[in-house]
Image (spheres, grey):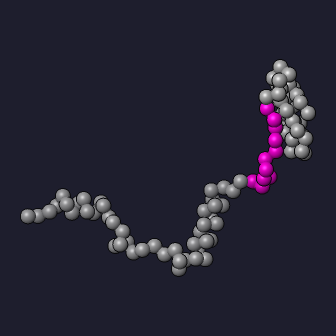
Amino acid sequence: MQVNMLEAKNQLSRLVKAAQAGEEVIIANHGVPVVRILPMESSEPARSLADELAGLRALLREEDAELALPPRIDRADTFMAAIEDDHVVD
């Protein structure tokens, strides 16, 4: 189906439903096709950041032994190094 801009503006909900049902919907400007409305490939809703983090936490619990962080002393502490450099006693 092809509709002009004004009709598309007034009937957007109907056009979206038609596209979701598999019908080809084209919007024209002065009779010249300019836009095609297509349904999304996946109809499943996007996961929220909270859901993603919950999934990562579950993975960490399952694989806890493999993902252990090194002890704090093995990691550089640039803040303490800068303080020690400032307070050197000769």
**Magenta stretch in the rendered image:** 35-45
Chief secondary structure of the magenta portion? loop
Position of 85 relative to 67 (above/below): above
- Where residue 18 sits, quadrant-wise, is top right
**Which residue in the rendered view is the most extreme toward the top?**
30
Q: Indicate the quadrant containing the N terminus: top left, top right, bottom left or bottom right.
A: top right
Does residue 17 appear anywhere in the picture? no
On screen, residue 74 above or below 3: below
Q: Is residue 78 visible?
A: yes
Q: Magenta stretch containing residue 85, yes or no? A: no
50 relative to 23 in the view: left or right: left
Q: Is residue 16 above or below residue 89?
A: above
Residue 35 in picture, x, y percent from top left: 79, 32
Q: Residue at x 57, y 72 (%)?
A: 60
Q: Horizontal and vertical percent for residue 12? A: 84, 33
Query: Which sits in the foreground, 51 or 73?
Result: 73
Rendered-image quadrant of the C terminus: bottom left
User: Which image quadrant is residue 39 in?
Assistant: top right
Most extreme residue toward the bottom, as rendered?
65
Question: In the displayed image of the protein, which residue is found farthest to the front?
Answer: 32
Magenta-colored stretch includes residue 37: yes
| Residue 52 horizontal side relative to residue 84, left or right | right
